[in-house]
Amino acid sequence: MHTSIGQQLVRCDQMPTIDPSAATAGLTRLYHYQRFDPDHLSTVLRDKKIYCSDPSSVNDPWDFQPWFDYRPILNNPDNIERMLALFRSTAGAALLDNPIRPIFEDRIRRSPEELREFVEAFSRRLAETLCKRRIYCLTPFSNSTLMWSHYALNHTGICLEFNVNNDLFRTARPVTYRSTYPEWTLQDTEDQVMQLVLTKSMDWQYEREFRLIGSPSHSDGVPLKLDGDFLHLPPCALASVIAGCRAKFDAIKIAVENCAPGLPIRRAVRAPNHYKLQIA
């Protein structure tokens, strides 16, 4: 499909600089697998917008759920102070002015157990903050048997084909896959936000995932502003609708023709004598 795709997607055990975007990777198409629901499909076709998922509901329990280990900072006073400085920067005025705060911070400095509890609580708070964002998951491959199975209801669903050459999909960011859990440092989270939401286990590498990450506002550093839980599609961004090899093709065709006459409708078919899907 794309001759250099294996080189363009990030797969390594050391934390690399995350490839900036789908456009930089040289991709021309991205695909999104989903169940076939006529109402949901009409939202895409007629209203020209795509639904972005709540990260707290995805199938990877580590996704958007960074967990920090307190032990690396246990005997490092400088890192403890940096962590507490980050805590103060995110705390409200009432907490900052609370006379108990200095006592609480001193207990964290002195007690490993207090430090552990604080880091775990901060991990949960950070996950809640990260999950205010919404994600739209994409891949460069339209013929993945596993993706059709897992995300398109056992090949009865559809796959949406998108052009990358527009202001939305060119910004899709690639996921990094690792065989070991990253050594996240809580005191450095402000510099690691994109790594926190774009790093997954090597178990998921078959997906070769790219993500659109939206936020209710631009104030948290995410450039894609949501409309509710949706992102608006640029003109001509949707290139085709692909039906799964077990899908009710006529029903999908009717739904597409009713909402977007002229939009190409394709289908996945089983290749003769091969464990392979072809897109016809």
Image (cartoon, rainbow, N blue to C red):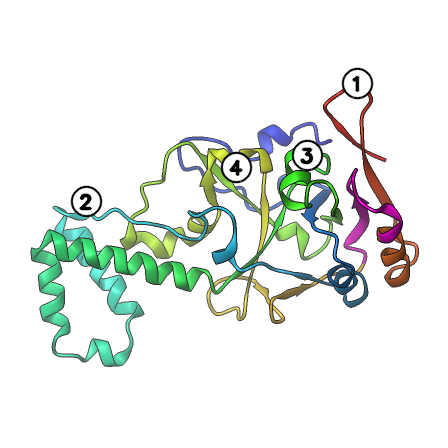
**CA separation in Å, label 1 and label 3:** 17 Å
Which residue does the numbered mark 2 point to in the structure image? 71
Q: Earlier in the sequence, mark 2 or mark 4?
A: 2
Magenta residues, as a range?
236-251
Query: Is 255 positioned to the left or the right of 162 in the image?
Result: right
As drawn, the residue found furthest toward the top would be 273
Which residue does the numbered mark 4 point to in the structure image? 204
Callouts 3 and 2 close, C-beta under 8 Å: no
Q: Nearer the viewer, residue 32 or 84?
A: 32
State whether residue 263 appears in this view: yes
Give yes or no for residue 179 being in the magenta stretch.
no
Q: Earlier in the sequence, mark 2 or mark 1?
A: 2
Above or below for 62 versus 4: below
Which residue does the numbered mark 1 point to in the structure image? 273
Quadrant of the frame with the C terminus: top right
**CA separation in Å, label 2 and label 1:** 54 Å
